Amino acid sequence: MNVFTTDHPLVRQSEDKKPGLLAYFFRMLLVALIISPFLAIVFWVQGNSDITGISTGDYEPDPFWMDFLVAMVVSFFVVFLGTSLFMLVAVIFRELRRKS
């Protein structure tokens, strides 16, 4: 018996085990949490800059926590749409590959 071809129970990967729906949700949550600080900084800089050149008088920009909250919601929306689109394309290509 060859030592390098034996399957150790801790190393062996089962072929029938697929990640569940909860695993996909937690992956989306992780990606959204990674993206949201960058979006929060972009929203905060955009809100505090005078790029538009319009004088608003006594305008007070939103606090940073409000920008961070909006960034979290936007990042969840973007990640959910991106993941859904990716899964849809993967299913379509898998079916096309089976037919050919």
Image: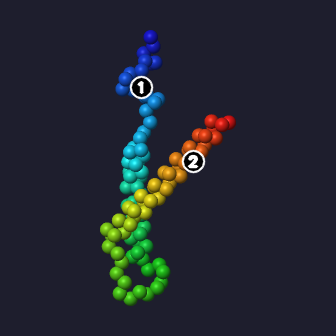
Task: Answer above or below: position of 39 versus 62.
Answer: above
Q: Give, as a three-letter code, the residue at label 1.
A: Arg
> Mark 1 — residue?
12
Verify CB contact (< 8 Å) between mark 1 and mark 2. no
Please state the horizontal and vertical placement of residue 1, each as a whole percent of the image: 44, 11
Q: Amino acid at mark 2?
A: Val
Q: Is residue 60 visible?
A: yes
Q: Position of residue 91 (x, y in %)?
A: 56, 43
Image quarter (top left, top right, bottom left or bottom right) of the C terminus = top right
User: Which residue is painted at 38% across and 88% down in the image?
Assistant: 57
- The answer to which of marks 1 and 2 sits earlier in the sequence is 1
Q: Residue at x 56, y 44 (%)?
A: 90
Q: Closer to us: mark 1 or mark 2?
A: 2
53 or 34: nearer the viewer: 34
Disc ID at residue 89: 2
Mark 1: give few (<14), some (14-19) or many (20+) Cα within 10 Å.
few
Task: Please say if 21 is above or below 59.
Answer: above
Disc 1 secondary structure class: loop
In x, y percent, where is residue 70?
Answer: 38, 66
In the picture provided, is 9 more to the left or to the right than 86?
left
Q: Is residue 34 visible?
A: no
Q: Which mark is residue 36?
A: none
42 vs 78, nearest the viewer:
78
Write the residue at 43% across / 33% down: 17
- Seen from the viewer's position, the closer of residues 29 and 7 is 29
Q: Position of residue 83 (x, y in %)?
A: 49, 51
User: Relative to residue 42, is residue 27 depicted above or below?
Assistant: above
Quarter of the figure with residue 33:
bottom left
Please tell me whether residue 95 is drawn above or below residue 67 in the rendered image: above
Dot 2 falls on a residue whose secondary structure is helix
